[in-house]
Image (spheres, rainbow, N blue to C red):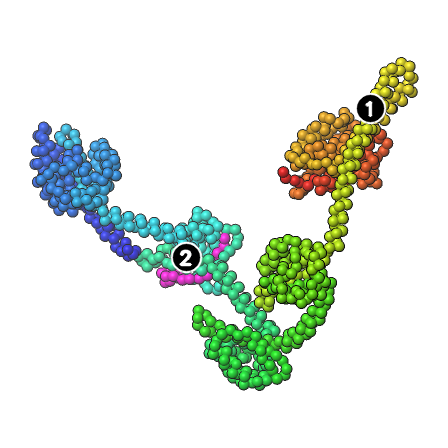
Amino acid sequence: MDNKEVVLLKKALERQKKARQQAERILEAKSKELYDVSHHLREANGKLENLLSEKSSELDGVFINIIDPYVVMDLQFNVINMNRSAKEFLGFDHTTKVVNLSQFIHPDYLSYTNESMRSMMEVGTLSNYRAKLILDDRTEKFVQINASLIYNTDRKPIAAQGIIRDITSEHEVKKLVSEQKKQLDIIVENSPLGIILAKDGIIIKANNTFVDMLGYSEDELKNISLKAISEPDNDTCEDDQINLMHAGKLDKFTTVLKFLKKDGSNFMAKTRMTAILDNEVKTDYQVAMIEDISKELDADRRLKASENRLAALISNLQTGVLLEDEDGKIALTNQMFCNLFNIEQTPIQLIGNDCVESEEHNKKFFKNSEKFISRIEEILTKRETVLSDELEMIDGRILERDYIPINNDGDYKGHLWAYHDVTISKNYRKNLEAQREKYSSIIANMNLGIVEVDNQDIIQMVNQSFCQMSGFDEDDLLGQVLSNIIIFKKNEFFLEKNIRRLKGESDSYEVEVFNKQRNRKHWLISGAPRYNDSGTVIGSIGIHLDITDQKELELQKENLVSELENSNQGLQEYAHIVSHDLKSPLRSISALATWLYEDYKDVLDEGGKQNLELMQEKVASMDKLIHGILEYSTANSSELDDSKVDLNTVISDIGETIYIPEHVKLVVPKTLPTIVADRIKMHQVFQNIIGNAVVHIEREIGLVEVLFKDLVDQWQFTISDNGVGIPEEYHKKIFDIFQSIGNNERSTGIGLSIVKKIIDRYNGTVWVDSIVGEGTQFHFTIKKNEI
């Protein structure tokens, strides 16, 4: 159903509404008269049946000409009386059977009906009650009922009367209009085009697409003029067109506008304005359809730029180009084509010339002019692509010609000729052959063994060096399968490499082979695929280097390393034994000194007592030195027991175990990370550095801080103090064993060397920054590990 039919239905519905309203007014007037008559009846105790019986004929007369059905019922919905229209509409006659109207009410409307009856009982009337009825023939009708109560002389309601209007058609029209409106809204909201409704150029509604286009909300767009958010892209007078539309002289027009978005950017849009006229043929509303054509305009610009670039490219090609259309006329050519054939006209002047005439003119430049013409005719007859068609010219030049037919969806649209001057390349090929022979001689005599095989591993070429390496003559190798002649210790490994070579992979690898004399050799092979002119793998080339001597040196090196490891192991065991043997007499000396002091402290003078104390200190220093040497000997050899280490716990343990002067504070400003490392080694690192720091602070308030940085692949830690500092000449020296600063006899000079060994094992570095009198910062890094 189109819009015109809907408009006609709406008009018919309006006329019907007016007729029914007139009938309702008549019914109300007559009902009032009937009520006045019944109110003044003197028979106060008359029964309802007699009253209705006396007035039935009068009611029939009153409502006989009313179009709509009229019904009288008692308060239990039983029909008492009805006019002819009601009988026809409801499909029954109340005089032949007792009918209860509630049986016609659709179940969905029962609750509403009961509520409406209660309302009518309270106010006496019921207006515009709408319901759905199911008649005896199962047809469904939508009705509107206006009703009122009928009272007896005591003003008690005894019945109800009402007019039934059939609004089924009206309901269907409304439903159809609603459905069409819903469909139209769906189409509008889901349209890829921006759609706006304007009145006198002011936007009153916009769809989601237009809202998304501009970035405004729909409320922000309302009451904004179209002119405020757009401007013409050309010299057309948009305002004049809109004025003509308002005057009813222009129904629609299309223009290109630049729309301004909320974020300040803009886009180009094809805008189609359509006027909606009122009954006086004046513009009431305007509808605008906005299509974003920014991409199309950009594509057009790019296409034109591409065409210009293509034209410039063809003009500057070092290839002579001649494009013929389907009629044999020159469509395009370039300056190189003119130069090849000594044509004085410019490429633009040649456009439109007959190609047959051009061929006749140019054939004089070729050695075999008749063959030149016949070959062109042969190619044009077949219309198949031809590449590198060779032509000899009388001046000694050699040209290669390509023919490319041009088809569009199967339709022949012409062809392209491309002429290349290959004189130099032809001469180059001759020189290349000479060079090839030269380098073949070099390859044959180089000290690297070269073998060339096909895809079946059949030897195609070998040089003299490979023959010497393998012990075979050239005649023994050519035409043979390489893997059958040369015995590889791991033959399957070599075959796997050949398979990868056929896939176009290159690599280098070592193999162990046996030469013709069954002597074991070590070769380093660098293999690469061999391609033909079209890029297809047709075999492989292997370059072989005999590394037997180097391999034997490596084996000797490995043996020496093994021996060194054994020696180191022996030295570590020796260090443990020595440390144990040294500590026993030290403990004895310490015990003897203690006994001497206890037994002769009353006899010894102060000098003797001091000597005994000095002896104890030297014994303690010696014990500390032995312990440090033992730790140093195992710092880079003992097995690392890596696990997750909470450094905050490590620093806390160190603070409780080492001696820290009262004026010094050990501080961790920021929570340290949990790292993966050997807990004991980390404890050694931090304790040695912190232990050095806390005893070299002479300030009244000493501070030692433990800091860190996350360097992605490493952790960097810094132990900073405000101590006496370290002179620059000692910054590297202090990490060597037995090197210490100053005259501190308690220092063994081993602690920082142990730190360096441990840090080296974790692929880190350790260094120091210090200024004498200000403080020192020890830095070290540790590679991040995962368990």
Mark 2 or 1: in front is 1
Horizontal arrangement in the rendering, residue 410 relative to residue 677 (left or right): left
Horizontal arrangement in the rendering, residue 382 relative to residue 131 (left or right): right
Residue identifier under label 1: 587
Q: Say what secondary structure mark 1 lies in.
A: helix
Residue 447 vertical placement versus 601 (above, below): below
> Residue 171 versus residue 258: which sits nearer the camera?
171
The residue under the point 55% across, 74% down is 387
* x then y, percent, for residue 465: 72, 63
Check the picture and name the quadrant holding the N terminus: bottom left
Spatial CA distance of label 2 from label 1 is 104 Å
Badge number at residue 289: 2
Horizontal arrangement in the rendering, residue 605 relative to residue 570 (left or right): right
Q: Is residue 86 visible?
A: yes
* x then y, percent, for residue 557: 76, 48
Q: Is residue 189 magenta?
A: no
Q: For residue 595, what is the image quadrant? A: top right
Q: Of the residues shown, which amino acid type is indicated by label 2?
A: Met
The residue under the point 47% across, 71% down is 407
Most extreme residue toward the top is 602
> Residue 504 versus residue 161: which sits nearer the camera?
504
Q: For residue 364, what is the image quadrant? A: bottom right
Q: Is residue 258 magenta?
A: yes
- If you read the primary sequence from the N terminus, does the residue marked by circle 2 or circle 1 appear first? 2
The residue under the point 37% across, 51% down is 186
